[in-house]
Image (cartoon, helix red, strand yellow):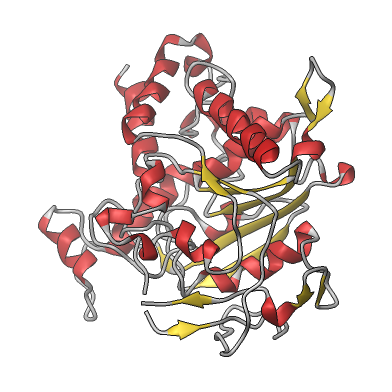
Amino acid sequence: MTHRLSSVAALLLIGVSASSGGAQAFSFNPLATLNNNAAPTTNASPATIKTPVVICPGFGNDSIDYLTPLSQPREAGFISALERRGFENISTVPVKRSDWVRVAGGLLDMGFYTNSALPTGRGYGWYIKRLKECVDIAYEESGGERVLLIGHSAGGWLARAAMGDGTWDETTGVRTADRVRCLATIGAIHKEPATAGSCVTRGALAYTNEMYPGAYLAGEGTAYVSVGGDAIVGNSAKDMPEDATDADMAYAVRGEGNAQRVAYTSYEAVCGEGEVTGDGVVPLAWSELPGARHVALEGVLHSINEAGTTIPTDEWYGADGVVDRWLPAVLEEAGIVNKKGVAGLGDLAKMFQFAQQ
């Protein structure tokens, strides 16, 4: 039983998050070449994006983390960053931090012990139900606009599980593609480790990959983008680096070594190897969804806080200074703008207006 409980504990490590943000007016020019180091330009006019967004929280996250992370001002949150880029209809799957204890309900599921747990089972079924309800509400409130799903961390593969085989509602015959325009995953795990028994999802991710592999519904008109961070190479050594950060110091005080050592532990739990690169929690290679457009971001971290601490970071996927390194790719794949740089709403240079603090 100790081994089984350790799987739940490992899950708690993978996805506990929270963020920051910034002031000075800037606006982004998506007409510029998409690259990982593109800088914002100035003097763009705002535009409205009618596509509704539903954010799928990562494991251990609370919905509030994307609104007012670590009790910071609303302007520091991911939702505010999206609003500054023209999105009007943004919602988050309603999840409290305490809700994640329900994953332990998988202990009552025999599939948990045979690595054959289902994503719709005791451990995660509650999340998938809420996700689908949230999408339906966003769709209705937008007047029938298909939804852009943004899945953070575990919210990425759980969104794939919710999208399923393409049947959204068996009763009405509604297809997933009728509700979901695009799935963008940020820091999500899309592969299970080689040894099935070490998978922290106890088979739920493996089931998702087997039944709905890769960009499974692309043929029906749902786009896919996967985004991963290339920020920290895992290292099992506890030595303090010469350029130690506040996070390194916090880990040292707790006897965990440093950020590289913490990343090593997390990567090993996710993929079976610790000496790989990633966002500090999820290995870069494990964030790539086969068949999806993939965006690798140098220097970008997994969480709105340094993993396992309450130290905020402005280097995570949803930070104001990072969003524009992956969002243009999502808008292109979703068909919100086309790949020639012409948007139905006008010049792409008018798609975003935002403020960093």
Above or below, 44 relative to 277: below
For the N terminus, give its image quadrant: top left
Report how many numbered discs are placed on residues in the image. 0
x then y, percent, for residue 91: 53, 45
In this view, the residue farthest toward the bottom is 42
Image quadrant where residue 204 sits: top right
Above or below, 305 relative to 211: below
Task: Identify the residue shown where x is 14% and y is 53%.
Answer: 255
Return the residue nearer the eye: 58 or 41: 41
The reply to whether residue 34 is in sight is no
Left or right, 139 with reference to 235: right
In this view, the residue farthest toward the right is 219
For the C terminus, give its image quadrant: bottom left
Task: Identify the residue shown where x is 73% and y is 83%.
Answer: 31
Image quadrant where residue 330 sits: bottom right
Return the residue nearer the eye: 236 or 76: 76
x then y, percent, for residue 28: 59, 81
Task: Identify the residue shown where x is 37% and y is 46%.
Answer: 64
Task: Identify the residue shown where x is 79% and y is 17%.
Answer: 170
x then y, percent, for residue 221: 86, 47
Left or right, 25 with reference to 151: left
The reply to whether residue 39 is in sight is yes
x then y, percent, for residue 230: 50, 68
Above or below, 99 relative to 293: above
Image quadrant where residue 295 sits: bottom right
Left or right, 270 with reference to 69: right
